[in-house]
Image (tube, rainbow, N blue to C red):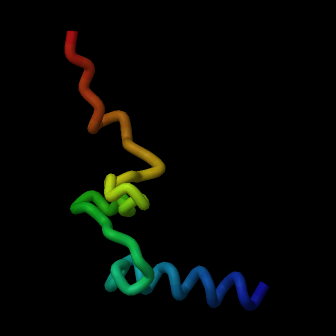
Amino acid sequence: MENEVKTSKFLSLVLRHNPASIGLKLDEEGFDFYLSDNLVWLTNFIPAKFIKVYE
């Protein structure tokens, strides 16, 4: 349990203050993006409020 707490605190600190230090790029909303091998920016989750359907 001690390692889980240390890991959690480390991630909280890094995500809040310097996500680039562990290879993450966060947008202004705090979502992470990463560059794929073929140079495409990807993310694992897109909130519904950012999706618009055009008809």
State which quadrant residue 38 falls in. Answer: bottom left
46 is higher (above) or lower (below) than 6: above
46 is higher (above) or lower (below) than 52: below
Residue lying furthest top: 55
25 is higher (above) or lower (below) than 54: below
The structure residue drawn at horizontal position 34% and vertical position 80%, both measured from the top left corner, is 20
State which quadrant residue 47 falls in. Answer: top left
Q: Of 37 and 25, which appears nearest the observer?
A: 37
Residue lying furthest right: 1
Count of marks placed on residues: 0
* Quadrant placement of the N terminus: bottom right
The structure residue drawn at horizontal position 33% and vertical position 53%, both measured from the top left corner, is 40
Q: Position of residue 11 (x, y in %)?
A: 51, 80
> Would you say 40 lies left or right of 37 here?
left
Q: Position of residue 14 (x, y in %)?
A: 42, 84
State which quadrant residue 5 falls in. Answer: bottom right
* Quadrant placement of the C terminus: top left
> Would you say 53 lies left or right of 12 here?
left
Q: Position of residue 9 (x, y in %)?
A: 55, 85
> Would you say 22 lies left or right of 41 here?
right
43 is higher (above) or lower (below) than 49: below
Q: Of 11 and 1, which appears nearest the observer?
A: 11
Q: Position of residue 45 (x, y in %)?
A: 44, 47
